[in-house]
Amino acid sequence: MSDWLRICPLEDIPRLGSRVVNNGDIDIAVFRNAEDEIFAVDDRCPHKGGPLSQGIVFDRRVTCPLHGMTIHLDTGEAAAPDKGCTHKYRVRLDKGDVYLNLG
């Protein structure tokens, strides 16, 4: 059984925006940057649990809307001087569709 889940067509995620996928008790934020790169992390800032999906996306980062912590979307790590990490998921683009690996 494949761990890859089809999420949506790439066009359904706005540039510099996100889409939230619920995986049981966990919300996963799937982001699209200006270069059409796709990233996925837990939709919780490691600082105070803010919804990263509602943050500002720039380059390969997102800023938490609650307190401004910046998270690197390609690693899930907080940008210095902040410390912390949110879980990162593997994603892929195949024939215009976004897939998320839940394994």
Image: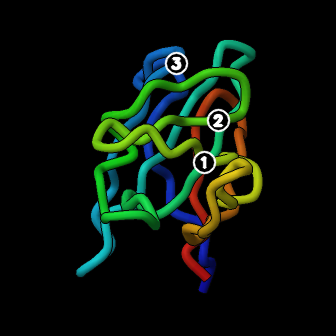
Distance of mark 3 from mark 1, alpha carbons?
Answer: 14 Å
- Residue 72 placement (x, y as % from top left): 69, 46
Asked whether the residues under the numbered discs 2 and 1 touch, taking CB atoms below 8 Å apart as contact, a structural biologist would say yes
Amino acid tagged 1: Ile
In front: label 3 or label 1: 1
Q: Which residue is mark 3?
A: 16
Residue at (42% x, 58% y) in the render = 45
Say which residue appears at 35% left-offset and 43% top-offset.
67
Is there CB contact under 8 Å for labels 3 and 1?
no
In this figure, which residue is indicated by the disc labeled 2? 61
Say which element carries label 2. strand
Q: Identify which residue, 24 or 88, lies in the foreground.
A: 88
Cβ atoms under marks 3 and 2 closer than 8 Å: no
**Type of residue at label 3?**
Leu
Residue drawn at 60 percent across, 86 percent down:
1
Residue 8: quarter of image = top left
Secondary element under disc 1, as helix, strand or loop, is strand
Left or right relative to 78: residue 22: left
Front-most of residues 67 and 16: 67
Q: Residue 5, how many percent across, how many down?
A: 51, 62
Find the distance from the CA under tag 3 to the CA under tag 2: 10 Å
Residue 71 bears which disc, if any?
1
- Residue 39 on image: x %, y %: 64, 45
Q: Is residue 49 left or right of residue 85?
A: left
Q: Quadrant of residue 70?
A: top right
Q: Residue at x 30, y 50 (%)?
A: 51
The numbered dot on residue 27 is none
Q: Identify the image quadrant of the C terminus.
A: bottom right
Compute the Cα span from label 2 to label 1. 5 Å
Name the one closer to the observer, 13 or 52.
Answer: 52
Element class at badge 3: loop
As drawn, is 68 to the left or to the right of 21? right
